[in-house]
Image (cartoon, grey):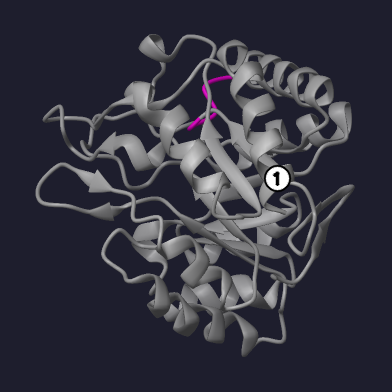
Amino acid sequence: MTREITIGSVKIGGDRPLVLIAGPCVIENEAATLRCAERLMTICNGVSLSLVFKASYDKANRTSVTSFRGPGMQEGLRILQKVKDSLGIPVISDIHSIEQVKPAAEVLDIIQVPAFLCRQTDLVVEVGRTNRVVNVKKGQFMAPWDMENVVGKILSTGNERIILTERGVSFGYNNLVSDMRSLPIMRRIGFPVVFDATHSVQLPGGQGGSSGGQREFVEYLSRAAVATGIDGIFMEVHEDPDKALCDGPNSVRPDDRPALLKKLKAIDAIVK
């Protein structure tokens, strides 16, 4: 069993029911972000599932220099604050440099360390010092047991509010594979574990100047992951994934999710 963590009105870990972390890959504009958050909240209320809203204000690790990155930190945090104020739900976004940590901590309920940066000691320690909940995405190049060292860096700051997220491991070129063994292995470290169902079907750099994806497999991987007893499921959603400015091929429509979320909730109830 993992320890229980409180994020506003949301509790994750322990024997708590599954939590959904979802939202668009990147903030495209204020109106679309608020629409997405409102729709997700309605869906989650309908299936009695706790929601943490996710959206990035800056995607610093895009494939191409011409890729859309988002509105930037100041404007993005303003929009995320509006989501919190208007809907009363916790928000999460990712940081990419030490300079971003302090201002991000003033708004975000969960600070996310991107997979590519999970071994950056100074960055991880600085995030830990905020005493915010820290979600670390396991690098595509790391074994699940190696995350214990990442956890140790955060614990060195006195912060025990930690979540670990699996998002697939590199499997040859432009491909990822999800090893379900990693989920119970990481849970043994003692902190809540989340499965990123949409990044796990990403094909990194698979379209040359951008990443591809196989969203048709999101449901199958989600069901398998929840059956291992994880604490949360992570999905990137967009009202029109084919027109999304970032990660469209591996994003899903929120209106296509209620039936899946009901299945995941039922599986979660059985295994817990």
Could you tell me if residue 75 is visible in this image?
no
Describe residue 213's horizontal placement relative to residue 23 as left or right.
left
Is 23 one of the magenta-colored residues? Answer: no
Describe residue 150's horizontal placement relative to residue 41 as left or right.
left
The answer to which of 234 and 180 lies nearer the viewer is 180
| Image point (75%, 49%), residue name | 107
What amino acid type is highlighted by mark number 1?
Answer: Ile
| Image point (60%, 70%), residue name | 127
Image quarter for residue 67?
top left
Q: Residues within 10 Å of mark 1 (few under 14, many from 20)?
A: few
| Image point (66%, 54%), residue name | 231
Per the rendered image, the range of residues in magenta is 25-29
Please state, as top left, top right, bottom left or bottom right, where the C terminus lies in the image. bottom right
The answer to which of 144 and 51 lies nearer the viewer is 144
Indicate whether 267 appears above or below 172.
above
The answer to which of 110 and 170 lies nearer the viewer is 170
Describe residue 117's horizontal placement relative to residue 50 as left or right.
left
The residue wearing badge 1 is 270
Describe residue 92's horizontal placement relative to residue 121 as left or right.
right
Does the magenta stretch mainly form a helix, a strand or a loop?
loop
The answer to which of 1 and 9 lies nearer the viewer is 1
Could you tell me if residue 138 is visible in this image?
yes
Please state, as top left, top right, bottom left or bottom right, where the N terminus lies in the image. bottom right
